[in-house]
Each structure stands twice: as C-alpha cells, then as structure tokens.
Image (spheres, rainbow, N blue to C red):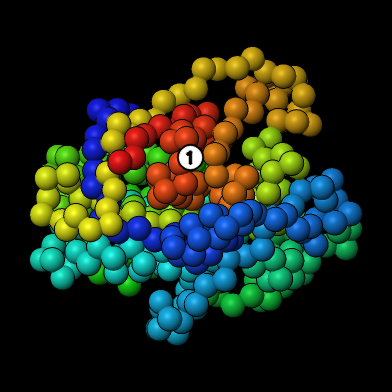
C-alpha cells in the first residue's frame, strides 16, 4: 500500500449529492441547514429490512451533460452520476485547453455495488422461478433473460462508469478501477497522487459514484453490518481533477490535499452476533468500525464518500478522516 503521504493540487471539482447536483448547490443547501432525509424503501416493506431508509435520488440533468442519446442507453445510475460529476470537474480544470495531452491524463475510479433498476431485476427474477418458487438456472436462460433488454447487462459492470467517463472526456492515459467500499476509493485517490508524483501522468481524474440507496445494495450493506437502521443510505458521486503542486495550473479556486494516508484499523474481537454483522458462529471477524463525517449531512454514500469528503471537508469545516467498510481509515489534510 502506498503511504508516502503525497500532496496534490485540486484544479477541478464535481459533486452530486441528495442536497444538490453540484458543489455549489450542495454547499449552499448545507449552509442553509439542509440535511439528508430518509424515506422508506417500498421493496423492503414487509421484509426484515423494512426499518432501513434511503434518501431520494439526486436530480441531475443528464442530457445536458451527455447529449449523446445512444451513449446514455449504456449508462447505469452509477455511470450517470459519475459522468455528471466528471463533466463539472473537467469543465472547471480545463486540462485539454491548457495543453495536457489525453495520453498524459489518468483516470482512477471508485465504484460501489452494481445493481440493475429494481423494476427490471424483479421481473427477471420472477420469470426465473420454477413451480416451487425456487430459482431455476434453466428458466433464467429461457424466460428470465427475455424480460430485459441486452443493453442492461452493461449496467451490472463495475467498469462502466470509468469506461463512460473516459470516452466522454477523451482520457487516454493510465487507468484503474477500485470497488466496492470507501477504502478502495481512497486507494484510487492515493494511486492517482503517486502516479502524478512519479511523473507517469500530468493530470489525474479521480471519480467515484455509488448507489447504496438501491434496494439490493441496501440489503447487502445491512446484512453485512455495514449500515444501521439509524443511518440513511444515499446515492452520490464526486470527481477531483488533480495535478502536481508545482504544475502550471491556475491558482483560482483550487485546494491542496496533503498527507493522504490509508491505514488498517486495529482488529476488533468478534461480537458473536451473526444477526448484527455476519460473524460469530462461523469464526468471521466482526463488522468494522465505520465513521463517515458526511453521513448526517448527505447520508452514507459508501464508495463515493472519500472523494465527497475531500471536496466538502474544507468548506464545511469537517474532520478529514473516514473509517470505511473495509476496515481501513482514510485521512488527509486540506488547504
């Protein structure tokens, strides 16, 4: 794990949260007292997870950011949010207009659990059940797959947000995809910073998106003990354009990230409560301590959280530390 504590200059920022579809809108809402609000998740009503809530989906003007209608058909919600955040950040940084070649721009993406629209996945699963109500692989192949358009298969791929952003923004340099928890997105940010420090690239585009508010993702998070009924799952995305501190980047509204660090948290003893964290009788470790300073404000955005915190911590005066689902602590300084 890279831990030389690099420093980078942030020359562009894009943010999409439940409070607003831009950095300015999110900050304005937060400063006026806006806070995430949880609402029941209809597909989970009548299930053991009906006590969990999610934020409303961020409202984005996708056609304004992605005019190509054909391209939009390939985009999952993850990819949509990532594309909007990336376009905002790159419009601010404008690396292409400053002479940075596409081959010298790297792309590092953090992505959460992939999930197809519940309307389509529910129909697929129902068509794949046999007479006893059990899942049948044969029916899945014969009847289930016929219920969805083949393009929907792209929505289940973790690499699609990175693929879409690289195509839309003309990024041709080094790239990497990290999934599905906060820790991996923090590592993506570290990898981007070290690539800049080594001179492998001249500009790094780090993008992250997640949709934990999706019913299937929320069930996975809840069953693993990664989210509690007291927290609110919320979809979100962020993008940071990074350059070396000594680069010729303009010094207009920019910030610096320093002492980036990702460390494993001390191991905790198992709580022997499989209902809480899936551990105990099988000898698995207990669920990690999770702390996200943004959770009371914009909800638990999981894989998107490290970049959102890097973008919002400075303006909002929040702690620059996040303990993720993977059992690691991400810390940094912002100036």
Residue drawn where x is 58% and y is 52% of the image: 298
Q: In which quarter of the image is the C terminus?
A: top left
Residue drawn where x is 85% and y is 56% of the image: 45
Q: Is mark 1 on a helix, strand or loop?
A: loop
Where 38 falls versus 116 (above or below)? above
Kindly tell me whether residue 251 is visible in this rendering.
Answer: yes
Residue drawn where x is 39% and y is 61% of the image: 14
Q: In this view, does 274 lie to the left or right of 101?
A: right
Q: Quadrant of residue 241?
A: bottom left
Where 146 falls versus 274 (above or below)? below
- The residue closer to the viewer here, 265 or 69, is 265
Marker count (numbered) = 1
- The residue closer to the viewer here, 73 or 227, is 227
Where 221 falls versus 144 (above or below)? above
Return the x and y of residue 264 as percentages of the image width and height. Answer: 45, 24
Residue drawn where x is 13% and y is 62% of the image: 100
Return the x and y of residue 294 as percentages of the image width and height. Answer: 55, 44
Kindly tell me whether residue 113 is visible in this rendering.
Answer: no
Return the x and y of residue 173 as percentages of the image width and height. Answer: 21, 57
- The residue closer to the viewer here, 35 or 85, is 35
Which residue position holds label 1?
Answer: 318
Return the x and y of residue 188 as percentages of the image width and height. Answer: 36, 44
Q: Neighbour class for label 1 at 10 Å: few (<14), some, many (≥20)?
A: few
Q: In which quarter of the image is residue 114?
A: bottom right
Q: In which quarter of the image is residue 280?
A: top right
């Amino acid at each position: 794990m890279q831990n030389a504590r690099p420093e980078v200059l942030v020359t562009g920022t894009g943010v999409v949260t439940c409070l607003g579809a831009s950095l300015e809108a999110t900050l304005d809402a937060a400063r006026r007292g806006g806070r995430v609000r949880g609402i029941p998740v209809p597909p989970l009503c009548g299930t053991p997870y009906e006590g969990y809530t999610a934020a409303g989906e961020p409202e984005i003007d996708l056609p304004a950011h992605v005019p190509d209608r054909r391209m939009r058909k390939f985009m999952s919600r993850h990819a949509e949010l990532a594309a909007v955040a990336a376009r905002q950040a790159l419009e601010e940084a404008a690396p292409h207009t400053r002479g940075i070649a596409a081959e010298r721009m790297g792309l590092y993406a953090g992505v959460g659990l992939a999930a197809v629209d519940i309307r389509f996945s529910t129909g697929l699963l129902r068509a794949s059940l046999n007479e006893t109500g059990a899942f049948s692989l044969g029916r899945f192949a014969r009847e289930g797959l016929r219920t969805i358009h083949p393009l929907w298969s792209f929505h289940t791929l973790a690499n699609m947000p990175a693929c879409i952003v690289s195509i839309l923004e003309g990024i041709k340099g080094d790239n990497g995809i990290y999934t599905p928890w906060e820790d991996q997105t923090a590592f993506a940010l570290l990898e981007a910073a070290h690539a800049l420090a080594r001179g492998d690239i001249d500009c790094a585009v780090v993008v992250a998106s997640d949709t934990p508010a999706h019913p299937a993702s929320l069930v996975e998070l809840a069953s693993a003990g990664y989210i509690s009924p007291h927290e609110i799952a919320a979809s979100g995305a962020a993008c940071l354009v990074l350059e070396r501190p000594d680069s010729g980047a303009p010094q207009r509204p920019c910030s610096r990230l320093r002492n980036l660090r990702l460390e494993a948290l001390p191991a905790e003893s198992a709580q022997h409560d499989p209902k809480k964290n899936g551990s105990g009788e099988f000898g698995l470790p207990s669920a990690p301590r999770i702390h996200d300073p943004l959770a009371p404000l914009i909800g638990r955005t999981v894989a998107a959280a490290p970049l959102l915190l890097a973008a919002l911590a400075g303006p909002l005066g929040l702690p620059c530390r996040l303990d993720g689902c993977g059992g690691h602590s991400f810390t940094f300084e912002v100036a």
